[in-house]
Amino acid sequence: MSRLQADVAADLPRLRAQLAARPVPPEPELAARIEEHLPTLHGLFVQLYGDRDDSFDALAAVMELVVDSWQRRPAALRALDARRTADPTWFESPTMLGGVCYVDRYAGSLRALHEHIGYFQELGLTYLHLMPLFDSPAGKDDGGYAVSSYRRVREGLGTMEELAELAAALREAGISLVLDFIFNHTSDEHDWARRAVAGDPEFEDFYLIFEDRTLPDAYERTTREIFPDDHPGSFVQLGDGRWIWSTFYHFQWDLNYANPAVFRAMAGEMLFLAAQGVEVLRMDAVAFIWKRLGTPCESLPEAHLLLRAFNAVLRMAAPGVLFKSEAIVHPDEVIEYIDPLECQLSYNPLQMALTWEALATRDARLLSQALARRHALPEGTAWVNYVRSHDDIGWTFADEDAAELGIDGFAHRRFLNDFYTGRFPGSFARGAAFQENPRTGDARVAGTTAALAGVETADAGGEDRVLLAHALALSTGGVPLLYLGDEVGQFNDHDHRNRPAEADDSRWVGRPMRPAQAYAARRDPRTVAGRIHARLRRMIAVRQQTPELGGTTLLPFDVPHPAVLGYQRPGLEERADAIPRARVLVLANVGDHPARVPAVTLSGFETAAHELLADEAVDLADGLSLPAHGVLWLRVT
Ligand code: OTU
C-alpha cells in the first residue's frame, strides 16, 4: 500500500520542523548541507520505501543520526571535511598512492602499526586500507568479512580508541585511512542475527528468512553461486528448518534492505566508522545488496539508489568521507556504481584481470581495447588501479569485447585459470584455484604478485613482469594501490593449508605474514626484494613528479605489434578535446621477446622525447625498441 501523495509532500516540512525543535538545532553550516541533500535523500527513500508506512520514521531517525554525528564530530575531522570539500578531486593528484594490509599479519596490532608509518611515508603512501579489523567469530570470519560488531575491534588487534588514534597519526603523516563498510551481510553471530533466529520480529525482518524452499528455489533459478565450495545456491538452512539468504559463506547472512530499519541501522554503523577518522569506505560486495525474484539479484537499480542514499547521509554528516565501490562484475555493471553522487572511487577489476591476461597470452590487444573503450569515467571520480587484491582474480572481461578479437570468453577463462594455477604447460605462474565449480566450469585464481608473475618459479621474466604490472597501475590514471609486501616480491603462503581456519579457502595463499626478510633485504640490489623494491620506488618517485600522470584521462595509442600496449596521458589540465601539448606516452611490451615500434607509428610527435624512468633523452626518428617486458614512460610533444 503506497503512502498518500499528500503525506509524502508533507515529509520535508515535518522533518525540518523536527530538526529545528531539537535541543540544539542544526547550526548554519549543517543546516545548509541538509537543505542541499535532504531532498535527494527523501526522494530516494520514496523510491525505495514509498510503499511502506514505516519509511518516514526510518528517515526521521536517520536525520537524527546525521545531526548527532555532525554535532559530535571532532574539530580535526571537521577541518578535514573543509579541506576535502574545497578540493573535491584531491585523489586525482599524481602523488596519490594506496597501500593495503592486514593489521595482524603486517604489524600484529593497531599499536604496532604506528611503527610502520615511517616506512609508509618512505614508500610514498597517501592512503592505507586496513583489511577488516572488526569483531568477527574465530574460525568463521571470512578474513574479517563476517562482522559480529562494527563498533568493536577484534580481540588481539586493539580497541576502537586505538583505531581512532591510528587514524589521527596516519592523517598527520599525510595518509588517509580506508576501511571496509561490510554492509551487504553480517556474521550469524551479530546481535541482530542472534535476535532474528530467536524470533524477535523486529530483527527477523533484518534478514531474508523463509519457512520452506518455495521462495529460495524460485530465487535460485536466476541467482549465481558465489562460494559453491561452501554451499550450493544462495541460501542456507537454519537449525529450525527455515532458510536464510546467504550469498557468501553460510555464516554471512545478507541484510534485508527492503526494510528501511536496516538502512537506518547500517547508516548508524557507517557514521560510527566515519567518526573514528576513516576517510574512504570500501563498499564491500555492492552488487548484491538488493534482491528481486526473477532477476540475478545483482546490480539491480535499487542497489544504486541505496548507495546514493548512504552517500547523501555522508554528504550531510561527514562530507570529507568518500566511497570506493567493490564491484567485481561485468564491466558494464562496474561503471554504473561510479558517480560523484554514488561511489567516487572504484576498483578497476577489468584492468587488473586483463593485465594478467596480457602477460599470459603475451598479447596486449584485449587490454588495449579495454583501455580505449572502458577507461573513461565521469568527472569527479577515479579508478583504484591494483595489480592484485586479498581476493581472487575473476576474469570479468566482457565476452562481447573478446569476441571482437576472435576470442571465445568461456574457453579463454579456462585457459587463464589453467595458466595461472600452473597447469598449463610452460606456465610461469603458481597461483591457487579458488571456488572451482565443476558444474559451470567457473573458477578464479589467488596468489601474490611474485607468485603469479613467475618470480616464485624463477622464470627469467618474473621480476620484469612484476614491474610491468605495477607500471601500468601507476600510469593509467586514478589511485594506484599496492598490496603491501608485494613491493618486496613476497611469495605465496603455502602453509595456510596447515592452518585449519584457512585451509579450505585458497585466497589465504595470497595473504602472507609481513615478509620481514624481504623487507630487510630491500636495499640490497643482489636480492629479488632489493631489485623489485628499487625499481618500484623509482616509478613511484617519477609518478609523483609527473603531472601528466594525474587525473584519469587516457587517450588510446595504437601500436602495430600485438605484444606492445600503448596509451597517452595528458594529465589534469588537458582534456581529450584540447590542442595537444606535452603528454606522457606509455609503451609496454608484454611479450618475452624484444619488440620494435616503427618510426611511422611515432611520427605524430616531435622526434626529441624524454624517457622519464631512465631520465634520458630519446630520439624517435628511427622508431623504438622495447626489451622483453620493457616499459617506457615517454614525455612527448
Ligand atoms: C568481497 O569479495 C571481499 O573482498 C571478500 O574478501 C569477501 O569474502 C566477500 O566480499 C564477502 O564479504 O566474492 O571472492 O563483487 O567478487 O564482492 C571475492 C563480487 C568476492 C565478489 C566480491 C567478493
Image (cartoon, rainbow, N blue to C red):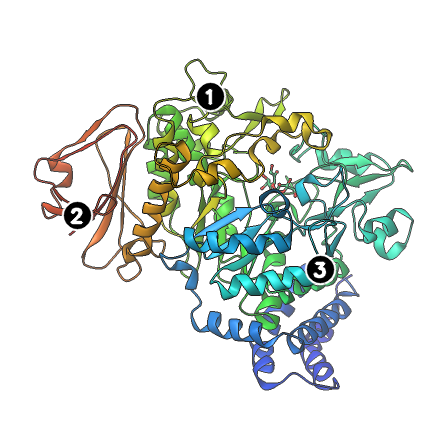
Amino acid at pointer 2: His
Disc 3 target residue = 263
Closer to us: 437 or 635: 635
Residue 536 visible in the snapshot: yes
Amino acid at pointer 1: Phe
Q: Is residue 27 above or below residue 190?
A: below
Closer to us: 314 or 176: 176
Which marked residue is nearer to the observer: mark 3 or mark 1?
Answer: 1
If the picture is divided into quarters, which one holds ligand 1? top right
Closer to us: 573 or 576: 573
Which residue is depicted at the point 53% across and 72% down?
81
Which residue is depicted at the point 71% across and 84% down?
17
Disc 1 target residue = 419
Q: Secondary structure at mark 3?
A: helix
Q: What is the number of the mark on residue 292?
A: none
Q: Earlier in the sequence, mark 3 or mark 1?
A: 3
Q: Earlier in the sequence, mark 2 or mark 3?
A: 3
Image coordinates of residue 299 in percent, x first then y, are 59, 46
What crowding class fits label 3: few (fewer than 14 Cα within 10 Å), some (14-19), or many (20 or more)? many
Amino acid at pointer 3: Phe
Horizontal relation, residue 495 to residue 464: left or right: right
Disc 2 target residue = 610
Q: CA distance from mark 3 to mark 1?
A: 43 Å
Horizontal relation, residue 598 to residue 534: left or right: left
Q: Is residue 309 above or below residue 85?
A: above
Q: Earlier in the sequence, mark 1 or mark 2?
A: 1
Closer to us: 548 or 537: 537
